[in-house]
Amino acid sequence: MVSLNQLFYGDNLSILRDYVADESVDLVYLDPPFNSNANYNILFRSPTGAAADGQIEAFEDTWRYGTEAANAYHEVIRSGRSDIAELLRSMQCFVGQNDMMAYLSMMAVRLIELHRVLKPTGSLYLHCDPTASHYLKLLLDGLFGPRNFRSEISWRRSFAHNDARQGRAQYGNIRDTILFYTKGNEWTWNWQYTAYDHSYADSAYRHIDPEGRCYRRGDLTAAKPGGDVSYGWPVKRMVGGGWEADIDAEFETPKDGWEYRQVPPYKGRFWAFSRANMTRFAREGRLVYTSSGMPEYKRYLDEQLGVPLQNDWDDLPSVSGRERLGYPTQKPIALLERIVAASSNPGDVVLDPFCGCGTAVHAAQKLGRHWVGIDITYLSIGLIQRRLMEAFPDINFNIIGEPSGLDDARHLAAVEPYQFQYWITQKIGGQPYRGGRKGADRGIDGYIYYTRNAVGAGRAGTAAAIISVKTGRNVGVAMVRDLCGVLEREKADIGIFVSVAAPSRDMAREAAAAGIWTDPITNESYPRIQILTLDDVFAGRIPKLPLLDRQAGYRRAPREAGARQQPSLF
């Protein structure tokens, strides 16, 4: 079993197979790309709040039917899970070998693994939209069985918007679907409640006691004797067919002339509580009487749990304010807290195989659960790492899949240069320039924001050091000259040259020849071209900049009040 709590960089299919044991997870939440043919970008900002120069492409929500999708399809067919295999084969006959089939094949092979790692009492929530929700529900029926389908939750993800203005000849779409399945016929469940509607509360709880508390009047009788009814606290139950405290002579009757015995106040009805409890209610001021002397129970509004949660969730606002981190498909923390609270207990294990910006693991940490998060981009892993450390300053967790040494970093640079660029840029406190997307980058791979002092009418405030990352082994003095040219073109003060290979003496001389920039207020000097190697990064050396804030330019997650790291189960 994987150690908890952990973030994994990599393909969730491989990680599930290699690290997560059978029946070891209590709750799975997944919010996979929806096949909506949209490229999602993360919006960065400068420390002043202005939008950064570009956007970073978090993921391309488009699936293509090719070798990988075909292999996934055949893995499902050969999996031995005949129900889901036959479903997928039928879908291919209907849908064809196209992008939708690629999406369904890639999801099916992963859903098989998620079903495997769930405990017998575990639950799975799959968050999707109408693009493919009907197909995904069929796959889940084939895998979990139709009888283990529990609910289709409708979540209102945004307020109404004017789609007509865009020329759309259809209804506006403001809802997502969350499919809820359990692995077996017994599962972890904790009822969640929502507040009463104001009109209902005003009508039902219209009585007000002298202390100003609103209450409603409740019946104290039952159709047959059979035990005390709970009105918000544990009460004694019937024993051997008689009231447990009915013969206790020390209790007085709550009202003169009224005796609490097993006689029907109305034809065919009995007292629902023992004499002891009825007397206690009276002493606590819990009884109110009709004109005929019949006692009724005061049910206070401020003691009620609310309305049991239904499957239409329109009470959770979309992400806004300090919670918004800029991730394109970020879900509100309240949504994930609701799911985690309902379908797991403290100390349980929550798994999110498509982490995104980490809302599920954030909710799990906040509610005292253990968690495992997986994502296929270093961008997301870096965002989640910062988010958790900002929200829970004392947290301890591991990141599996990021370079842990020079050999790992060199291997990543060789096989996945763009992922290396994401990783190394964030490692030194920067943010990627336009996500390092393929194409002309104008010699800029990232920025590090810093404070720039100035005198008079000179430039002051926030400035950006330019990052240039070189993943190859063949680096030379021309590359340093190129960075100098970029600084001149962009009117930047400082450039950071990050290299996998060690720089030559000529490169060091060229960097020194670029000169220094001096802060006019503090008179501190900073090399205009600073060269960092992998050795420097692993030694913890960072660029020399004024008032360097390693998190500048990223939206910060608010700190969770009273949050602390939960002890490990292992």
Image (cartoon, rainbow, N blue to C red):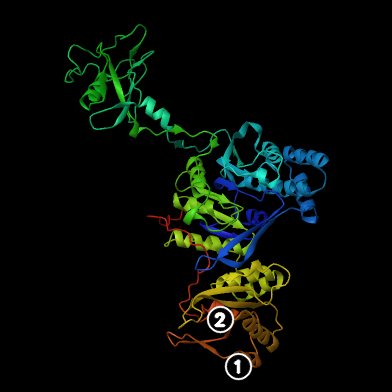
Q: Residue 435 in the image: state x and y as whole percent.
A: 65, 66
Single out the residue that lies furthest toward the top: 267
Q: Where is residue 222 in the image (x, y as percent from the top left)?
A: 37, 15
Residue 536 got which mark?
A: 2
Q: Residue 453 carries which label?
A: none
Q: How many numbered marks, from 0 up?
A: 2
The spot of residue 488 in percent (x, y) is 63, 84
Q: Position of residue 54 (x, y in %)?
A: 63, 66
In terms of depth relative to the viewer, which is nearer, 293 or 471? 293
Q: How crowded is mark 1: few (under 14 residues within 10 Å), some or many (20 or more)?
A: few
Q: Give the class, few, some or many, for how many residues have Cα within 10 Å of label 2's Cα (few <14, many ≥20).
A: few
Of 38 and 84, nearer the camera is 38
N-terminal of the pair, mark 2 or mark 1, is 1
Question: In the picture, residue 537 is in which quadrant?
Answer: bottom right
Q: Which residue is drawn at 66% across and 71% down?
A: 412
Which corner quadrant of the image does residue 285 belong to? Answer: top left
Question: Position of 514 compared to 198: left or right?
Answer: right
Q: Amino acid type of disc 2? A: Asp
* Foreground disc of the pair 2, 1: 1
Q: In this view, does 164 lie above or below 65?
A: above
Q: In this view, does 523 lie above or below 118?
A: below
Label of residue 513 in the image? 1
Quarter occupied by residue 505? bottom right
Q: What element carries label 2?
A: helix
Q: Which amino acid does label 1 sit on?
A: Ala
Q: What element carries label 1?
A: helix
Q: Relative to 68, say whether 285 is above or below.
A: above
Location of the N terminus by quadrant is: bottom right
Is any part of residue 444 visible from this angle?
Answer: yes
Q: Residue at x 59, y 60 (%)?
A: 8
Q: Report whether 2 appears left or right of 489.
A: left
